[in-house]
Amino acid sequence: MNTNNIKKYAPQARNQFRDAVIQKLTTLGISADKKGNLQIADAELVGETVRYGQFDYPKSTLTRRDRLVKRAREQGFDVLVEHCAYTWFNRLCAIRYMEIHGYLDHGFRMLSHPDNPTGFEVLDHVPEVAEALLPEKKAQLVEMKLSGNQDEAIYRELLLAQCHALHRAMPFLFEAVDDEAELLLPDNLTRTDSILRGLVDGIPEEDWQEVEVIGWLYQFYISEKKDAVIGKVVKSEDIPAATQLFTPNWIVQYLVQNSVGRQWLQTYPDSPLKGKMDYYIEPAEQTPEVQAQLAAITPASIEPESIKVLDPACGSGHILIEAYNVLKNIYEERGYRARDIPQLILENNIFGLDIDDRAAQLSGFALLMMARQDDRRIFTRDVRLNIVSLQESLHLDIAKLWQQLNFHQQNQTGSMGDMFAENTALPHTDSAEYQLLMRTLKRFVNAKTLGSLIQVPQEEEAALKAFLDALYRLEQEGDFQQKAAAKAFIPYIQQAWILAQRYDAVVANPPYMGSNWMNEMLKVYAKRYFPNSKSDLFSMFIEQSFFMVKKGGNAGLIVMEAWMFLASYEKLRIDIINNKNIHDLIHMPYEGKGKTPLGI
């Protein structure tokens, strides 16, 4: 893969997508002055249209536009622009990858044409694509095509319909119908100077063959933002850009093979898996006493479905992709049906956390693409991924949502008016579920700053899983209020459940940030919960990985070498020497960002 093409394209794409989103927001009467102050135009209804400032839109856009206004007021204009820009960038990159690999169900390219450098294959096959994506509008779209001058409108309809169709398999990346971000899809998509041309022309098709292209796109997309925030005290919203770095493939293989692979080989030393892992290091010969100690903590047998692997700073999923490969070999060794393996791995074995929504989107997408290689029907199987972007709970109206959730069926008695009365006493606040919910939401008030360093007691794992399953059922089977409330609570219970589990392998390229650059909230948390490792985020992640790994499990991290020598890490070193076992340690042959020597 030639990353030079990606390095050139992705930063330009960020600016282009941001500009396009700002332009669309302006037509919706949403803008900001030079000081960042929000400017919202009134919505004026004129028959079946609504006017936002100088621009007219269909009346049907009003609700979605209101949601954008709400987000702009809550998040700020620039954050809204950034989020919507990367949302469309991620979606279009995903569609580009899928069309090149033939993963779109209708079989035609959405963003390009195999025989026409500036064309769109779907526009040559409107009846077939409409039948697959918009059967209710097929006749209308065919008629528009026959008119000969409505390709832009047709293409926009088909592209949005493609996003809706992908929602079932990838709800974390593609929204259902009436997503407000649809209003911000750039204009003039079929023109030769379209925003799509850079994506199609700027990166050759051969560079799209490996799913790692997604990670490289992500790294270079945020590179300008990263450069802008490095060397300063980092605000919470800038932590992802300041700390993320794509991990080279050989390092990823080494980390995973000597943690996940080692876990399997400790129980099955003659497994053929060993011959498939180029970077696996054989354990050193041990004394009989040490061999006895190792035998005492090594399980006699392992079921593949029981192996749990966590990347607590998963980024775009590079480490989890390699974990998928190793786990696939383990399942095959045990004779599982090939078509069952992908879903089993995604739902039982692989877990990922990050504080960056866009990174988690791409991580989930990359894993699904790995699964799609092995199971052509994976998109129809309603796979529930365990890849989570940690969310903050501060904005939730907990009382209202708990009332709507009606978890204990308290609303079956009394009047409808009681359900909406402002002064109604909150029901069942002494229940185990409510108490668990409140403890959980309290932990995640600052989740975008603290991320995977938040500690959840293992004792709560079973209760969290039971509550999560109940919320999933209400999301599917409850009334409209229960569905909405369950959907709102699920992210917090899911991320707590992931943090409460203990893993066979914790593998990460953790964020690096010295205490000088931490904001005050992070500094205070570090001093309170990580006194032995508070000097840098990477060392705090070392300590947190020990907290999250099972007894007898393996942690594999790539970190700066400073922890081995500096006085500020002495307590961490003593803890590792006295209470942990190091089975291998590699000093890197080159320097990392900022000329800092690295180690694994």
Image (cartoon, rainbow, N blue to C red):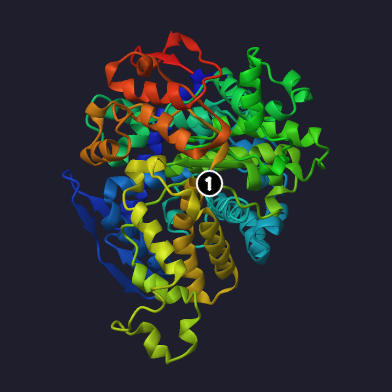
Q: Hey, what amino acid is under mark 1?
A: Gln
Question: Is 437 positioned to the left or the right of 280 in the image?
Answer: left
Q: Position of residue 115 (x, y in %)?
A: 69, 32
Q: Find numbered disc 1 in the image and state the secondary structure of the residue it sits on.
A: loop
Q: Position of residue 252 (x, y in %)?
A: 56, 23
Residue located at (74% from left, 31% from top): 329
Q: Residue furthest bottom?
A: 415
Q: Position of residue 319 (x, y in %)?
A: 56, 30
Label 1 belongs to which residue? Answer: 501
Image height check: is 138 above or below 600?
A: below
Question: Is 485 positioned to the left or the right of 95 in the image?
Answer: left
Q: Position of residue 263 (x, y in %)?
A: 65, 29
Q: Residue furthest front?
A: 289
Label 1: few (<14), some (14–19) or many (≥20) C-alpha neighbours in 10 Å: many
Residue 523 vs residue 253, the one in the foreground: 523
Image height check: is 250 above or below 532?
A: above
Residue located at (24% from left, 42% from top): 521
Residue located at (71% from left, 48% from top): 378
Residue 70 image-quadrant placement: bottom left
Does residue 115 show up? no
Image height check: is 80 above or below 367?
A: below
Residue located at (61% from left, 33% from top): 321
Residue 535 vs residue 267, the one in the foreground: 267
Image height check: is 66 above or below 92?
A: below
